Image: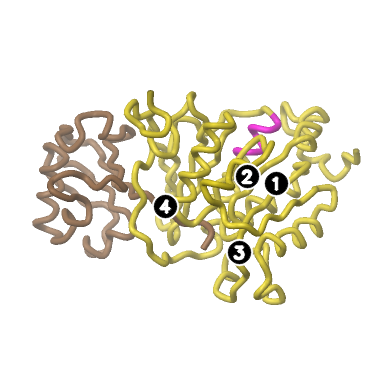
Amino acid sequence: MAVKVLIPTPLQKLTDGKDVVEAPAGKIIDIINALDKKYPGLAERLCQDGKIRRFINVYLNEEDIRFLQGEETLVKDGDEVSIVPAIAGGNF
Amino acid sequence: MDFLRYARQMLIDGWGEQGQKKLKNSTVFIAGAGGLGSPVSIYLAVAGVGKIIICDFDSVEVTNLNRQILHSHTRIGINKALSAKITLTAINPDVEVIPITSKITSENAFELIGDSQIIMDCMDNLETRYILNEVAIKKSIPLVFGAIYGIQGMLSFIQPPETPCLKCLFPEAPPKETFPVVGATPGVIGALQALEAIKYLVGIGKLLKNKLLVWDGMSCDFKTFKAQKDPSCIVCGK
């Protein structure tokens, strides 16, 4: 069993078009780094200086990790991680 | 008041004549007459909202027409708020439509929003959305946030202090880009935004408070995440 990570559309170019990828359980930051090895460039899009960019929300199941332990939040087997970038659009 | 036009919606539990009168006596501020502003304003107008203030400084362009259903090819070059008034008045002459052709700024937003009971955030950039967020807090009125990208979108009902504010939810704007979009996408999110406003104004149902709804049209999946107040938020934190 592993952790499911949901990839938003703009980042699916980096994950060979996959909207869901799997990673071993662990801290959020370790999961991102593990995925970056398989899908190079992903960590850079999500993080800056080891911190998740402020316009990207990451949810562990339904919880925003900023209100858990941030990048250090522990993800267990069977959990689901969702990456939700802020989107600005509507009008233009 | 002629209720015949609204007879079918008045059958909804908790709506009735009272609910319809509440809508008639309501004023809604719609920020943006584009992709989201189109379905939002059309559904609020046909539902019988008494007064719609719709604000957009931009003019209709041919590349808008795949999604901005308020406008048509005959309106190219016309200001979008003025075009919106023509469309909305035609589909429901009961509604008073006030078009505003100014750009929303931190200087004018408070005055433009006036005595509106709710703000519909249909903007294309987070900077202006943050201005609307601050005015909503100052006026103690809710803001219905909606945003789209490609075949996905999100929304939330923002009403601090009961809910987080938009800055708690998204503390920073993403880099600017011309994003992909198909007309049905703002159709989905805009219809949900309009329904949240209608529920609030009529006083029925549960509102999307303290939640962020994320819709992925590629997989036809709706997900709901918890939206939390940030105690250190520079806008609503104490």
Q: Which hue belongs to chain B? A: yellow
Question: Comparing marks 4 and 1, which lies closer to the viewer?
Answer: 1
User: Which residue corresponds to mark 3?
Assistant: B68
Q: Are marks 4 and 3 in contact (CB under 8 Å)?
A: no
Inter-mark Cα distance, 2 to 3: 15 Å
Q: Which residues are magenta?
A: B196-202
User: Which residue corresponds to mark 4?
Assistant: B216
Residue B194, by quadrant, is top right
Q: Are marks 3 and 1 in contact (CB under 8 Å)?
A: no
User: Which residue corresponds to mark 1?
Assistant: B44
Residue A38, how many percent across, how many down? Answer: 11, 58
For badge 4, the amino acid type reads Asp
Q: Looking at the image, tell me whether mark 4 or mark 3 is earlier in sequence order.
A: 3
Q: Main secondary structure of the magenta part?
A: helix
Inter-mark Cα distance, 2 to 4: 19 Å
Could you tell me which quadrant the C terminus of chain B lies in?
top left
Return the mark for residue B194. Answer: 2
Q: Which hue belongs to chain A? A: brown
